[in-house]
Image: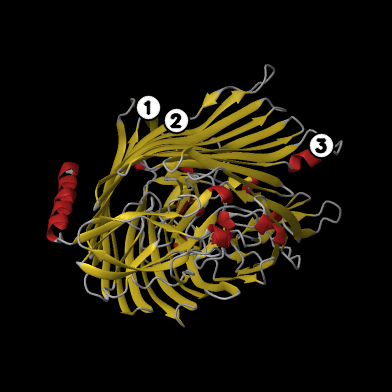
């Protein structure tokens, strides 16, 4: 059956390739930054007279078929000078371009700068791209530039909690986001328990967030894809840059290995707030710090072949008085080969390793805990520029997973802890995809594709067997769910298939362009997520455990439709984007009351399968030009979950009715602005306002002896208070920067200017002195002023 489906995909591929092939002259090449030869992703090439265009891919390559003769070409990219050229095509031609940043002067004819106008030319929708220049102007907590917190200012994106680095997209959970760094999966995107993200802004070249209309080349998550690429490194000359802040510092070096052919990049960050603890006698044995390292090598073998080797390594260390220590972090490695078969066919082969590790050492009880997840991924992608109106992407990838749910060991010779290894789990996830970009007429464009994904849960494992195949039973007398007792076990040997799944994942998008400045778009996509995050918190924590789909945990299946209107106003000075979406997810798990999730070797005994749905309206108004620019975004949305009883006798969760998911934020308003006063001063401000996060409060209680015990009501029926804060920043660039190689700037920022005490949680307790019941709010940040110094040479 699987072989037939694979054959069907390849037949579809061959038919598509032959049906749309046209004979035209091809213009192709690479577009780079003029200063450092860094390839540029997503550069727009447009022939206004022909009403055709294309963009560069993830490696700066473009290809477009153009009729014979003289043609006007416009090239534009955010933050760079735009170019207009008249070119003459009499044969297939390779033409590389070097773009200059907006602040510099070109000898060529310059039209203007592309400032992030609404995309009206392609079917791509529900996609946001932020330049690093924009992100670095945003004031953030403790003066540290943060990629994850920057995307929280986009419509449809909310935070996972005060001080948390996770994020929620269109009502989905943080675990439903696929986060990629140079194609490698990042399983935990936070440093210092969520105060910072793992992405060093100096090392990042490009990021794009897909909230819907997700291309078929992506899979494995139900809500979104955050695709981040590191810089390649300067192949012209050696440079260094960095920054010194109150909490952490960073340094990055880049330069040529062989001039104009190969380069290296190495960057590191480290925090040192823990050093201040050493000044206190009470705190001198405590630590809380992080460090990370970004590396990349690339080499151009010839015009048709490039090699890349990139990696990331990061760790967090938290320790209290030598009795408690916690170490966690990500490691990734990716070896890539770009090959150009012809001026119309580009390929990329990647070998990827990703590892997330979590370690906990409780020395005072002699307890040591290790857990994590590793994957090994091989992927081969092709981009086929068949004609100016038809392009194909197709490829395959295969991921092998190694899950370590946890191992317990004694941490010293006197420990009474008995060693235990929770059953390791293994899985294999191969997939094939094909997607097309098809311009039907000058006004109508389509993007459509199909992904075929498979998933195999593999041995070496022992599986519990239950009566009626139900690991959770319902106690009708007490109206509660309880763990079932296994009636038997079954052992599966190494690489034996325990459970298999396969799914077709169709994708479709359409765009109707009324004119050059406005378009109407719609999209549909299905995503299948075979991994589940086992967590009892709404935001990610290092202790969370990833579990594969199996006999009892089903894969999540998400279907999303969206429609949107996009308009550029006053020649692109302003842009308006309006989108509405509806998303439903099958097999979203929730936990029975009193579920124990940590070190549970039979997690199926505490979970129930349910469903989710979310829907909303997103608006974004941007000012793209002038001294003052920025945007206002607003989202009105609803996110709900339902976990009904499996039979008419069961009550499910919240009596089987729809209830607020932990990620439901009815209102989400964000305003961000940047003001360029002069060459010396730049200012920035952000304001964020969100509805409070759903929580469960007690609605009654009972007396047990002298203690009042609260009784909690329906799940997620209550909310925390509304979340809001205002942040400001000022950047001082000394005038003497222009006359020397060393260039520096001072960044002054204030997070939470009016000292809003946003609630991270509210707990209920009985006052030990007065015996009065009270609610206690926990806040993480008040007002936080910061200063940092950035430099480059």
The residue that mark 3 highlights is 278
Question: Does the image show residue 89?
Answer: yes
User: In the depicted view, which residue is nearer to us: 446 or 596?
Assistant: 446
**In front: mark 3 or mark 1?**
3
1 and 2 marks in contact (CB < 8 Å) = yes
Which structural element holds mark 3?
loop
- The outermost residue toward the bottom is 570
CA neighbours of label 1 inside 10 A, class few (<14), some (14 to 19), many (20+): some
Q: Give the side of residue 282 with respect to residue 368, left or right.
A: right
Q: In which quarter of the image is the N terminus?
A: top left
Report the Cα–Cα distance between label 3 and label 2: 40 Å
3 and 1 marks in contact (CB < 8 Å) = no
Image quarter for residue 88?
A: bottom left
CA neighbours of label 3 inside 10 A, class few (<14), some (14 to 19), many (20+): some
The disc at residue 424 is 2
**In front: mark 3 or mark 2?**
3
């Amino acid at each position: 059956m699987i072989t037939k489906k694979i054959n069907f995909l390849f037949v579809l591929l061959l038919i598509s390739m032959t049906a749309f092939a046209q004979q035209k002259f091809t213009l192709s090449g690479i577009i780079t930054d003029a200063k450092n030869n860094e390839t540029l992703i997503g550069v727009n090439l447009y022939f206004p007279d022909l009403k055709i265009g294309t963009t560069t891919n993830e490696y700066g390559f473009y290809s477009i078929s153009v009729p014979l003769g003289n043609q006007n070409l416009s090239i534009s990219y955010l933050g760079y000078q735009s170019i207009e050229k008249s070119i003459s095509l009499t044969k297939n031609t390779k033409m590389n371009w070097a773009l200059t940043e907006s602040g510099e002067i070109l000898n060529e004819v310059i039209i203007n700068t592309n400032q992030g106008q609404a995309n009206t030319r392609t079917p791509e929708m529900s996609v946001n791209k932020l330049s690093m220049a924009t992100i670095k102007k945003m004031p953030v907590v403790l003066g540290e530039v943060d990629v994850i917190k920057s995307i929280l200012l986009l419509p449809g994106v909310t935070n996972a909690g005060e001080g948390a680095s996770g994020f929620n997209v269109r009502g989905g959970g943080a675990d439903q986001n696929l986060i990629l760094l140079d194609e490698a999966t990042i399983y935990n995107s936070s440093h210092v328990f969520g105060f910072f993200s793992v992405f060093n802004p100096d090392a990042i070249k490009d990021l794009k967030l897909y909230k819907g209309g997700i291309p078929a080349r992506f899979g494995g998550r139900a809500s979104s894809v955050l695709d981040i690429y590191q810089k390649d490194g300067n192949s012209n000359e050696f440079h260094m840059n960095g920054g010194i802040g109150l909490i952490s510092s960073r340094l990055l070096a880049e330069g040529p290995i062989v001039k104009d052919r190969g380069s290296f990049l190495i960057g590191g960050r480290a925090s040192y707030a823990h050093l201040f603890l050493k000044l206190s006698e009470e705190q001198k044995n405590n630590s809380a710090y992080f460090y990370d390292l970004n590396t990349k090598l690339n080499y151009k073998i010839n015009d048709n072949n490039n090699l890349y080797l990139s990696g990331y390594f990061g760790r967090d260390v938290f320790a209290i008085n030598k009795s408690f220590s916690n170490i966690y972090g990500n490691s990734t490695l990716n070896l890539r080969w770009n090959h150009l078969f012809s001026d119309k066919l580009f390929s990329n082969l990647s070998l990827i390793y990703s590892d997330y590790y979590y370690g906990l050492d409780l020395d005072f009880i002699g307890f040591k805990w290790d857990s994590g997840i590793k994957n090994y991924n091989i992927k081969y992608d092709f981009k086929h520029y068949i004609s100016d109106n038809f392009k194909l992407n197709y490829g395959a990838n295969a991921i092998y997973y190694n899950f370590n749910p946890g191992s317990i060991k004694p941490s010293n010779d006197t420990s009474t802890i008995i060693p235990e290894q929770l059953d390791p789990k293994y899985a294999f996830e191969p997939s094939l995809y094909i997607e097309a970009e098809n311009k039907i007429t000058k006004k109508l464009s389509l993007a459509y594709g199909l992904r075929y994904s498979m998933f195999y849960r593999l041995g070496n494992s022992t599986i519990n067997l239950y009566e009626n195949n139900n690991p959770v039973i319902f106690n009708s007398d007490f109206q509660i769910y309880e763990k079932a007792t296994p009636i038997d076990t079954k052992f599966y040997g190494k690489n034996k298939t325990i459970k298999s799944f396969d799914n077709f994942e169709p994708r479709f998008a359409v765009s109707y362009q009324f004119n050059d400045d406005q378009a109407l778009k719609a999209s549909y996509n299905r995503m299948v997520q075979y991994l589940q995050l086992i967590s009892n918190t709404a935001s990610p924590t290092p202790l969370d455990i990833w579990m594969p789909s199996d006999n009892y945990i089903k894969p999540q299946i998400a279907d999303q439709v969206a429609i949107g209107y996009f308009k550029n106003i006053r020649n692109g000075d302003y842009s308006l984007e309006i989108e509405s979406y509806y998303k439903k997810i099958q097999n979203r798990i929730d936990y029975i009351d009193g579920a124990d999730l940590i070190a549970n070797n039979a997690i199926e005994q505490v979970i129930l399968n349910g469903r989710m749905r979310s829907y909303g309206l997103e608006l974004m108004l941007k000012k793209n030009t002038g001294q003052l620019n920025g945007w206002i975004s607003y989202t009105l949305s609803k996110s709900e979950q339902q976990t009904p009883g499996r039979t008419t006798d069961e009550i499910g969760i919240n009596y089987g009715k729809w209830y607020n998911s932990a990620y439901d934020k009815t209102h989400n308003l964000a305003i961000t602005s940047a003001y360029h006063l002069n060459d010396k001063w730049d200012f920035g401000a952000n304001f964020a306002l969100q509805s409070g996060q759903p929580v469960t409060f007690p609605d009654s209680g009972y007396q047990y002896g002298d203690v009042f015990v609260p009784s909690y009501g329906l799940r997620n029926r209550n909310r925390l208070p509304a979340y809001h804060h205002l942040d400001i920043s000022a950047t001082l660039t000394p005038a003497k920067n222009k006359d020397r190689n060393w260039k520096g700037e001072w960044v002054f920022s204030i997070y939470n200017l009016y000292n809003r005490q946003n609630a991270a949680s509210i707990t209920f307790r009985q006052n030990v002195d007065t015996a009065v019941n009270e609610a206690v709010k926990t806040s993480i940040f008040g007002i936080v002023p910061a200063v940092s110094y950035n430099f480059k040479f």
